Image (cartoon, grey):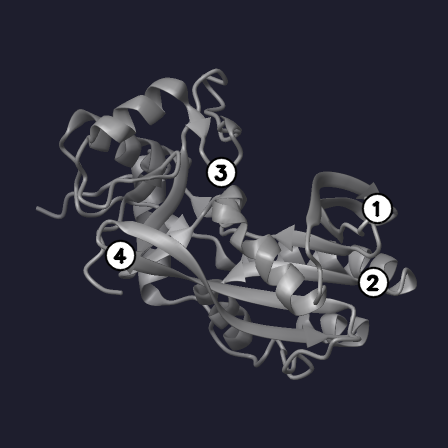
Amino acid sequence: MTGLPKRVLELYGVPCIDGRMSRELQEAVKRQDCMFRNRRCFKTRKSVPEQSIGSCTVGYSDAALIVCPWRFLAEDTVFRDVARHLLPGAQELAVVPEVRVDGGTIDFIVAPVGDTGELTDLVGVEIQALDTTSSGAIWRSRQDILGGHPEEKYGYGINWKMSAKTALMQLLHKVPVFAALSSRLALVVQDHFFDYMERTFDMSAVTSPVASEPLHILVYGLHREGNRFSLRLRRRASTTHEGLQRMLRPARESLTLSKEELLDQVEALLRERKGYYVSLT
């Protein structure tokens, strides 16, 4: 996937890769509803909490990166894949969000429904999108698209390390809960994010999926068809709780921050007026 601008690519689930204000996008902005949750977008501006942002996917280094976890809910693809690979034979699923367990709150519990309506098993599902730096730059990108004059590049970055550590630390508390229940927890991430984790952390104990292991990882890519993206399962893996603990170790003692990422952070800070310029003439 190449040639993508570094700006917001989807708002409220509506594609805006070409930067044009379509009728579909106009309606979505007016409603401020997330099409994947059938409710108002939860991402709001701190200064104006009644105003949602609506950003689902952004361009970065010629890739489309998912920055909202609910973007993964499109067409129930994730839940269908969980059933296919972890709950074989299920004919109907119950999907319940935000269920409290001993280790915290699980994004979703997926349970197959028996012939008489009883729930016969369960799998927890945790979804981790990527965090961005400089929400102001994301907002400017959004507003410029709505105004019909978007730029090709905006000064936000991707907080890869924080996104990964957030996911891994939560899993450390939650995986043992599902292991004790003789059940499993599925982590859903994007392929670019998983690639980063493989480069940065010790993933030597993450292997091809073993049905009995408590942590399963479902890795998705965004397949582009014209101006629209669809989720495709690219890869599956699993590990034990000990393997998860190993994932918190660095893969090697070397730089994990690219020059482009560092410059992105500098540009974002300059836009937020947290730096200044010095004339040399």
Give the amino acid at mark 1.
Thr
| Nearest-to-viewer mark from 1 and 3 | 1
Q: CA distance from mark 4 to mark 3?
A: 19 Å
The residue lying at 78 percent from left, 74 percent from top is: 213
Left or right? Give the position of 53 relative to 171: left
75 horizontally vs 250: left or right: left
The 10 Å Cα crowd at callout 4, few under 14, some 14 to 19, many 20 or more, is few
Q: Quadrant of residue 95?
A: top right
Image position, residue 192 (x, y; %): 44, 65
Q: Nearer the viewer, residue 87 or 234?
A: 87
User: What numbered label is drawn on residue 183?
Assistant: 2
Front residue of this view, candidates 174 and 214: 214
Residue marked by disc 4: 225
Mark pair 4, 2: CA separation: 37 Å
Secondary-structure class at tag 4: strand
Q: Earlier in the sequence, mark 2 or mark 1?
A: 1
Q: Describe the element under mark 3 as helix, strand or loop.
A: loop
